[in-house]
Amino acid sequence: MASKIDKESMRVLVIGSGPVVIGQSAEFDYAGTQACRILKERGIYTILLNSNPATIQTDNYNADIVHIEPINVENAKRIIEEERVTHIVGSMGGQTALNLVMDLHKTGYLEEKGVSILGTQPESIRIAEDRELFHTVMEANGIAIPWSVSLKRGNFKEIARTIDYFPVILRTSFSLGGLSGKIIEDGKELISVLEEIFSDKNQESVEIEKSLLGLIEMEYEIIRDHEGNSIMVCNMENIDPMGVHTGESIVVTPSLTIPDNLHQKMRKTALQIAEITGIIGACNVQFALDLDSEIFYVVEINPRTSRSSALASKASGYPIAKVATMIMLGDSLGEISNPITKNTSASFEPSMDYVIVKIPIWPVGKFPDSGSIGVSMKSTGETMGIGRSFEEAFMKAVVSTELDFGPYFKNNNDSEIMNMLRVPNWKRLGFVMSALNREMDPAKLSRITGWQVNILERLGSLFAHLNNCKDGLEPNIKELKKYGFPDRFISWHTGISEYEIFLMRQRSNLFPCFRMIDSSSSEFSSQTKYLYSTYDEEDESGSLKEGSILILGSGSNRIGQGLEFDYSSVKAIHALKKFGYNTLIINSNPETVSTDFNTSDELYFEPLTLEYVSGIIEKRKPYGLIIQFSGQTGQNMAHDIGEIYGEDIILGTKPSSIERIENRTLFSRELDRLGIKQAKWEQVQSVEEISEKSRKFQDRVIIRGSFIIGGSSMFVSRNEEDIDFFISSLKLNNVKFPLLLSEFLEDATEYDLDFISNEKQLSIAGILKQIEPAGIHSGDSIAICGPGIPDQELKNKMMGIAEKFLETYKIVGFTNIQFMEKNGQLYVIELNARASRTIPFISKTSGINWVERGIGMMLGHNGHLNEAYTEEYAAKIPVFPFNRFHESDYVLSAEMRSTGEGMVRAKTLEDLKEKIKSFYSIRSPQYIFFDSDRILDIEGEKIVQITEREAIDIINSSQDTCVICSTESKSRKMASHLADMKKIPLINNQYIWNFINSK
Amino acid sequence: MRRFLLLEDGSSFGGKAFGSFGDSNGELVFNTSFTGYYEIMTDPSYGGQVIVFNFPSMFYYDFTRDIAQSDSVSASGIVVRDGMLPGGGSFRILDDLLKSNQIPGIYGIDTRKLTKKIRDAGNLRGFISSNDKMPDYFPEMNTGELIKRFSTKQSYRINGNGSRNILYVDMGTKKSLLDEMSKLGNLDVVNIFNLPENYEAYDAVFLSNGPGDPGSRVFDGLKSDLKEIIGSIPIFGVCLGHQIIGEAIGGKIEKMKFGHHGSNHSVGNGTSSFITSHNHNFRIAEDSISGKGIEILYRDLNDGTPEMIGMEEQMVLSSQFHPEGSPGPRDSTGFFESLRSVMDGIKN
């Protein structure tokens, strides 16, 4: 590649990663946004393809042209031709983008069109992606890889007898559902298992591989330029040993338990691999390390930015995607200046005088799943804790999960604790804390969990110390804070509320100080306000700035609270900057754009709890606090903040109004008083009352509590069985009464309305109509908008209700109302006094910066009364992770389960339907429709009823037949999994099907 | 037990004691590595210095004999942030190690605050004491004594690879440097007080790292010997050795504000760069060697410090950074290959 590329003639296409799915989330918005920014800064014409409307990347200012369309070969080709693309970037959009670029390359298309790939070249990518080739190349260069051998039917016995290294993993292509691995302990067992396998006539070969289970998993983040210069940005030690996917592991950076000589060997090997492979830009190398023999194996490499590179960037303050982009454009490492200190070189390795701990977030309770973790990823996001010691970082990360670990501190059932520790699972972290709290032997815990004993010992001694503070909390609080115990952690242990602990600290003026992340352990001074808190002497947050506003971020990506909120946070920062404010943000999610230290004026990487928010308020004295972009997190904290600092510090709707809205009973009473229609409702105070009052509505009810997240305390019942199930599930959960029980209206149409307001006036930002009926979570439904949706009469009714709410609750800022309509009657389902998940979508469809307008109104500006509505139609289409949860039946409910969304747009409703089909990759005219009581084979006008066996045969033999499952179909679980496995288009309910087929 | 770190600028830091009892003093240097702390503590170059570790959560892996760079902990004192937790843990090993070497340590210090102080004030001397009473004076480093203490007492020979004989001037060498050099030939290891009469018998002279001030009179004999032999046999050096060579070839040494101490410094030559391990408070002043036929082969990318110099005709090659790593990266072990090439008479 030429070392300098002529920028004038460049037209670069950047590929994004599409809807958020498990394994691909906000980290690629972060990487892609950085890449686009650098391209723009260099004056290069930039074109972006990404179907995800919730990304910052797809905002127009980041690229010259943004194409929000499904990421596929057809669309890419069309754009390449229309836009006369000269270069393409596939390393900033995860596996989706890399695969697309490789597909375009393999067919010779890119060469034919004269399009060059920027950064790592296809030959190099192939080495990384093709396992066999990777092994060959590594072996040829003397790099240790896990040894493996293929056994054939003909010779398995002779070869098996020569294997003397156990345990091994035996893999067969035996079962549907892909390769399954079995661990074999010795030669005798191996022979007998092989004999059994080969007794099946269909079995031709098996793979035997050295088992790396239990070894330490290490990662190295590497950057290499075209001159061959390379650096390690940081290394990461997985606390969970090999066998747990790195995305599912608790990770610490920098490494703690690895001696320097071993670390240096792995580091050098990683650089060597980048060299051999020919990486230009970013690369991640994973090792399995045997600490006893000091041997390490290369597990895999990723020739692109990744989830780990986002974590490494946030952990070290070294923006990998940014530097990698400069390198792709021909800069050498030595030429680039360190983006955080601004006065040193980018050719250096960041040093840290703090520790980082990452903890994954799983969709607990969302899917029927054992919760075991292993080689496949199930987590939806992650949270990062920063501390001045490992212990502090670890506990801050635990608190950042926003999960309640309180019950684990009360667990004294040692045998249950031990059992739960044996197998890696979603709850194991909790049980590790139970075990440490019970002061169990660290050596024993280490043997069971595979965690390093030194780590468990240090944590154990801290837990023991907490147990020993018998003379009460107050005399010990200062010391506990110095050791790194967050208030919430102490609260779990002592049962004293965080609010009480805050008051205790306030009495002794004990507040955190803030430290800079400067990539050099303060060896060089830094200008960038990237800060974290600790309880120590010196504060580095600097002189106070007039007119500061603190925005609460939304924390880790989880179902129901993800990228959409981060989009709004980032846009709010931009708006506030424009209005002349000094912007502060607090967030705990390392994947996001909001935690890019270039986004806000001051970035506080902290858990979203009262302690840290108040810590910032104490030190930075902000003029106001914005909680409306933090999803439910901020709503839950509003009350305490209001108590301490007065309601006026909260910009937008005040905490007292929020309480009247979030409290279901108060809200329903208010609706009645205002004469606004709602479904018939009852308040229930006890478990007994649930069944009694449900009977009034023939058990067709929606049950809700106050303060929900992503619908997780909502339940829809259709019959008595559902009620019984709900009651039995209550026993396992800590549910706070009263609950609100309301009549469930079948086949009602749900609408989502977002508006912005100051105290006096409001502007409607958008109204979305859902394709699926009410009762299915709005986040899981396809939603459409456009001219005539809804009709003027209904819209007027909605407006009237919004006006009433404005007056009643003095609503300011962003608000979302959920309505349902049945037989011309409009009912209110709920009101949320915060920005909703749909803000980015309606901003993209209307081309209006709703966040900026809303911030303006929040600050008291006048509204825009003349609305410019788009002439276009648009649809928001959710995506689901069902294929990772094999027990799930793909049925949608009031419990939100989609991880993300894509967007399509069209001039007419008819075209929109075609675009939706294209989103689902529907190419064939053939559909298999699993209706409630029959299965239809549909091809144009020809409709034939077929048997289940026939349907399966058709699906199995086809590449692109579309499968549609009615919610009532008895075969839906089987059919859906089959379609997912075959990677053919799947529409998982009849409502979508009816909509796209309606005339 | 309380313990204090008192600084010559009049400030003090209160912390807790570990390691041996007793007071100690030395020049404060901070090190930014997150691994390799045992190598650092045992590196004789830190003789007379008090090491401030920037990385807080250390000692999660254990000390083993084979990674030590000398027989004892060389620094005069150790300052860390994270110390004994109420339960002990692996930190106890460090405690025992320091006790057996009679080195005091202090923990619970805000090392970031201290580092910024060192960074902004330049070199600072400190006193580790059991009380907070300022000492009357902060003693100067006595380079002569340090060299005596940390270099070999008696000359000895290491039979290395090949048939070459290299005179290895030990001024407080790291073990890993001896290991690397023995791959190039047999080493006659001597201290500066027992320099040979006749250098011509050797294929090369190598000057090791070590503690103290390169401007000290104690090196005068060595420097004048080097002046005599320059051009007749190859002369190599690392760190302190590099600085002594710099003076012998007509350069001047300057003290840096707070030096380079860490495993993450990049050096480059305009086209290529790599990450190196540094530990130096002094450097060759660049203007003092200009126009003398001395080539600066690599510079620090941040502040331009000459990090490797060479004189091709005179067969001189020396490195300010530590190509042997230990601790730190070994991306630059090619340096030793270059030494071999010089001895082979291969130019460039």
Image (cartoon, coloured by chain):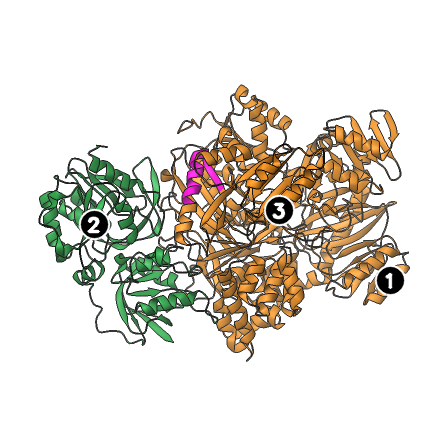
Chain colours: A orange, B green
Report which residue position mark 2 lands on. Answer: B241
> Majority secondary structure of the magenta segment?
helix
Q: Is residue A216 visible?
A: yes
Q: For the residue carrying disc 3, how many other residues have a C-alpha within 10 Å: few (<14), some (14-19), or many (20+)?
A: few
Q: Amino acid at mark 2?
A: Gly
Q: Which marked residue is nearer to the observer: mark 1 or mark 3? A: 3
Q: Which mark is residue A62?
A: none
Q: Which marked residue is nearer to the observer: mark 2 or mark 3? A: 3
Judging from the image, mark 2 belongs to the subunit labelled B
* Callouts 2 and 3 on one subunit: no
* Earlier residue among tags 1 and 3: 3
Report which residue position mark 1 lands on. Answer: A691
The magenta segment is A267-284
Looking at the rendered structure, the secondary structure element under dot 1 is helix
Q: Nearer the viewer, residue B296 or B191?
A: B191
Q: Amino acid at mark 3?
A: Lys
Q: Quadrant of the C terminus of chain A?
A: top right
Question: What is the distance, in whole Å, between disc 1 and disc 3 at their CAs?
Answer: 59 Å
Report which residue position mark 3 lands on. Answer: A188
